[in-house]
Image (cartoon, rainbow, N blue to C red):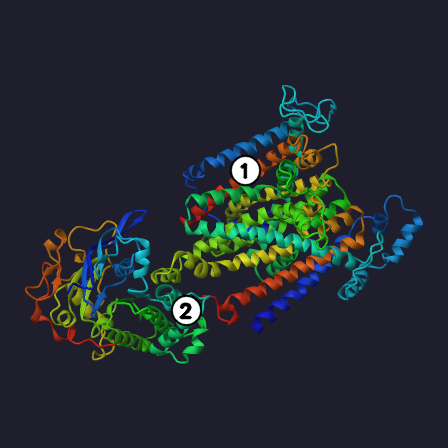
Amino acid sequence: MLTFVRGKVLHLVPVMFAVTCFSFLLTSLLPGDAAVVMAGPNATAESVAALRSGLKLDQPLPVRYVDWLGKAVRGDLGTSPRSQTRVLESIRERLPITLELLLIAQVMGLLVAVPIGIASAYRAGGILDQAASGAAFAVLAIPGFVVAIVLIYLFAVQMDLVPATGYTPLLTNPLENLRSFFLPALTVALGEAAAYTRLLRSDMIATLQEDYIAMARAKGLPTWHILLRHALKPSSFTLLTVLGINIGRLLGGALIVETIFALPGIGRLLVEAIYARDLVVVQGVVAFVAVAFVLVNFGVDLLYAVLDPRIRHGRALA
Amino acid sequence: MAAHSPDLTTEAIIVAPAAAGVDRPPRAWHRLGASFWLSVAWLALVTLVAVAAPALHLADPNLQDLTDRGGSASPQHLLGTDGLGRDMLSRLAWGARISLTVGCASTLLGMVVGTLLGMTAGYVRGRPEGVVVATMDALLAFPALVLILAVTTFIGHDISIIVGVIGFLGIPAFARVARANTLALAQREFVLAARAMGASELRIIGLEILPNIVAPVLTFGLLVVAVAMIAEGTLAFLGLSVPPPAASWGAMVAEGRGDLDIWPQVSLIPATVFFLTIFALNLAADRLRRVVEVRESRI
Amino acid sequence: MPPLLEVTDLCVEFRTERGPLRAVDGVSLKLEAGRTLGIVGESGCGKTVLSRSLLRLTPVTAGRIVFDGRDIVTMDESELRDVRGRDVSIVFQDPMTSLNPVLTIGSQIAETLIHHLRMSRRAARARARELLAAVGIPSPDARLREYPHQLSGGMRQRVTIAMALACEPRLLVADEPTTALDVTVQAQILDLLKQQQRERGMAMILISHDLGVVAGRTDEIAVMYAGRIVERAPTGLLFRRTRMPYTEALLRAIPRLEHASHTRLLAIGGRPPDLVDPAPGCRFAPRCSRVRERCRIDEPPLMPDGAADHDFACWYPVEVPDLPPHSRGRVGVGGT
């Protein structure tokens, strides 16, 4: 187990390095003068010059990268010239909202995917299976913003059940908070549910062919017990892995949903910064999101090892 | 990307089975099924309308008519009008040009570069392969939409830039598929035979490997077109794609968004067209993939 | 006393691309309580399908399987679930794949006790511990919490046996229980099965491709070929008066310690027949050393050998006294 962890960590370091390098390069290889871009079209020559020296933009690239990296490792991702707030502060403020969105979405997705996935696998090829597969396929074909629009139309406009946009903090009013998360989480959850159902179904079908399932049947155990206790656990590894990876990926990718539904999360922070050409914030947030993604993936790998007793004890998978 | 962006990495793995043998039994076409041909028909229709838009006698897509905002279908406006009285059908047709151009061009870019990289990595192996794989993985660790947003905002909204960055993001996925298929093929007898007959490595790659990975790569390409179109649509929805008055489907959906309670069809019609196109692409790719796979098992 | 298990004309057919495949073609068996039946045959003869169909783990096409007066083939699901694991247990060939890798040994043994005997979790655990000790597993307490991959092959098979014995079944079906194990361990497992059977008064069906495994451990042996029983007799009689040429060939194929080294192994030439489209006549005809015209035209039915309790299916059976001494007689016990 320890060798396994060590191996993963060693793999992790260069990837993190590459990823932070990349995000730094992203904003630094723009054509034209970054200071000019950031200062905006109405800036005077003096303000541009002040910006340039303030952000040390006249230094050569490698120096700037090392400087930035050194500060970043210590938690200083810079200060936005626009809002004068520290990037890390902004992230800290916005992160819980994005996380709440992702969590609710994943729970919703699983609530749908697990029962349907199990039922589809159990009677593979049956009516439920075909209907579910078709629905999953169709849902995965709908672009996220289209889902959002349709859901807004159905739930907010037609049925007036939940607010279309806007956000209420959890501590202010928990019910309103959940209501404001309903549509955005559902938008994300639909796609997740479709993907998870397919994944779980195919894993389950494979598991149900195994000898130990035949043995469980031979022992006269009831079907629900076999499905939930014998078949679900071995089939859930891929699902859990993907779930973990999705959370990492969605940290950056939920920005569409956050923008459409006006949720003040990290994604929206990024979009705002991009609109405002606030390179410092863009750089910081992109690096944060990318590093978080890599770390979450790493965590998922570890979790996988913990869950699968075979890996835990260092044996090769049968 | 869309909130649940079709994950290119999982799609890559699904399509990755080794390419089929060179012989093509004619019965394969029958196995494609009605759904495949329906999808192809839709895609052909959309493409045709997009390409021929200037030649068709459509209304001016930018002509506003504030007396007929959000109007329903009528003889002059077959699909009604949008929030500013502009003809929906015409806007859909002209919008298709943008959506399809971005979708196809960026996919082509990613396909060519990615396939070359992947083939080389899979064939040459060793250090170059390691470098390619590591780079692709690092690229994949990036939230794609963020990258697209950042680049288009900072560099520009020109269609060529959009095509470039979306295409660039497609490279790792194609590289994976190409590499996986090349790895499988490189062990096969006909490659060994060619080498034994003294063919140069370049010849082998070009004449033996390449024709055999064309099928899975193209099939995968259909999926990528769908993803690219979604990416462009998302950008357009945020107002970050080609600037107005040119409007791709995504922008059309965004335009109607504020008026969902008054005239929802302004958003929902382009949304439906968009969905049907993506669905058709996915369905066609799925059917093709099955035929390719089945052929492979007959070998 | 009616037999504990009576199988009549059992047929198991599978649908394949080339047509229906009859893996089990009209098999009839009888087994009394407390007795052991050995079923022997080469790979592909249908013995595994037969063993699985006894508990309807494979759907049965036709025939009857009457266990303790009730027909397993026509039972409804819930009644069948009662029989499975409680009245009739099965041990599969490969203990690595028949144990769930992500569940502890303890839970896999306890679950039958909890479901069939309504034991509490604690009582079931205690019983599981007893069972592990009974099958000769050291430190049973620790084992309860372990996972299958942490045990050796022999241990795992003991666990499977413990699982099968948990609810005190009346019949145990052991399908090639030692094939996946090391030679040294095989004898131990077979002895364990025999011991448990005697202690509990269970009936047992022991299935193997290896005559050596069933000799000396069974009361009766049935030889299967191409989905059918081709010879059946009490064990001693089978070896003393082999009638079916196939059985004789099987006996001859066993290598012996007393032969000089490098003696050629007498394998049975040819391959098993196609069960989708079997040729007419006796199914063993293409490979039989005693084949004659009639064998290729008429399929021999299972006929009794005079008044003895011995059935075989052959037109030109082996005549008893003429066999040279090296090809029959006592076979070494405990696996090959």
Q: Left or right of C35: which side holds A184?
A: right
| Chain ID at mark 2 | C
In the rendered structure, find residue C41 and report the number of the disc placed on it: none
The amino acid sitting under disc 2 is Ser
As rendered, which of A75 and C109 lies closer to the eye? C109
The structure residue drawn at horizontal position 30% and vertical position 47%, both measured from the top left corner, is C18
Q: Left or right of B21: which side holds C225?
A: left
Q: Secondary structure at mark 2?
A: loop
As rendered, which of A195 and B290 lies closer to the eye? A195
Q: Percent from the top left, x then y, of residue A25?
A: 75, 56
As rendered, which of C176 and C55 lies closer to the eye? C55
In the rendered structure, find residue C120 and report the number of the disc placed on it: 2
Q: Is residue B204 visible?
A: no
Q: Are marks 2 and 1 on the same chain?
A: no
The structure residue drawn at horizontal position 41% and vertical position 69%, both measured from the top left corner, is C120
Q: Which residue position holds label 1? A: B280
Q: Percent from the top left, x then y, of residue A115?
A: 49, 51
| Chain ID at mark 1 | B
The structure residue drawn at horizontal position 25% and vertical position 63%, both measured from the top left corner, is C42
As rendered, which of C34 and B9 lies closer to the eye? C34
Q: Percent from the top left, x then y, of residue A224?
A: 42, 56
Instruction: Choose top left, top right, bottom left or bottom right for residue C209.
Output: bottom left
Q: Secondary structure at mark 1?
A: helix
Q: Left or right of A177: which side holds B283?
A: left
Image quadrant where one finds the N terminus of chain C: bottom left
Query: Which residue of the protein is positioned furthest toward the left in this rendering?
Result: C306
Instruction: Choose top left, top right, bottom left or bottom right for residue C135.
Output: bottom left
Image quadrant where one finds the C terminus of chain C: bottom left
The amino acid sitting under disc 1 is Ala
